Amino acid sequence: MIELDGLEAIAVLVDRGLAPNRSAPWPEGLNLAKLPLPEGAPVRELGLLWPGGSSRMYLIEAVAEMPLAG
């Protein structure tokens, strides 16, 4: 398994059928189509961990309260 975080690299892999699609925006000029997943498709669950007593608790709380894209 590999992980990529560069959207352009991911978009090129998706364009070539080598990686699953995700939501836009994509760089212009790629021939991509977003298709719905079938019923019962795997779901990725996310978690959030932080150190207790963080001086940036306000940022952590803001991230924790953000709605997930779906």
Image (spheres, grey):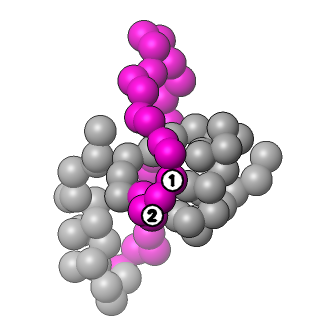
Q: Position of residue 9 (x, y in %)?
A: 63, 63
Q: Considering depth in this image, is 46 or 24 the residue closer to the camera?
A: 24
53 horizontally vs 66: left or right: right
Residue sitting at x 42%, y 27%: 35
Kindly report the distance in space between the C-alpha atoms of the residues bearing marks 1 and 2: 7 Å
Q: Is residue 57 above or below residue 67?
A: below
Residue sitting at x 33%, y 89%: 55
Q: Give the labeled residue for mark 1.
A: 30
Q: Considering depth in this image, is 2 or 64 the residue closer to the camera?
A: 2
Displayed quadrant of residue 25: bottom left
User: SS class of the residue under badge 1?
Assistant: loop
Magenta residue span: 26-53
In which quadrant is the C terminus drawn? Answer: top left
3 horizontally vs 23: left or right: right
Q: Is residue 35 above or below residue 21?
A: above
| Residue 36 part of the magenta-drawn span | yes
Q: Is residue 11 above or below residue 14?
A: below
Look at label 2 and name its amino acid: Pro
Look at label 1 and name its amino acid: Leu
Q: Position of residue 50 (x, y in %)?
A: 44, 69
Residue sitting at x 50%, y 18%: 41
Give me the disc on residue 27: 2
Question: In the rendered picture of this protein, how many numbered marks are placed on residues?
Answer: 2
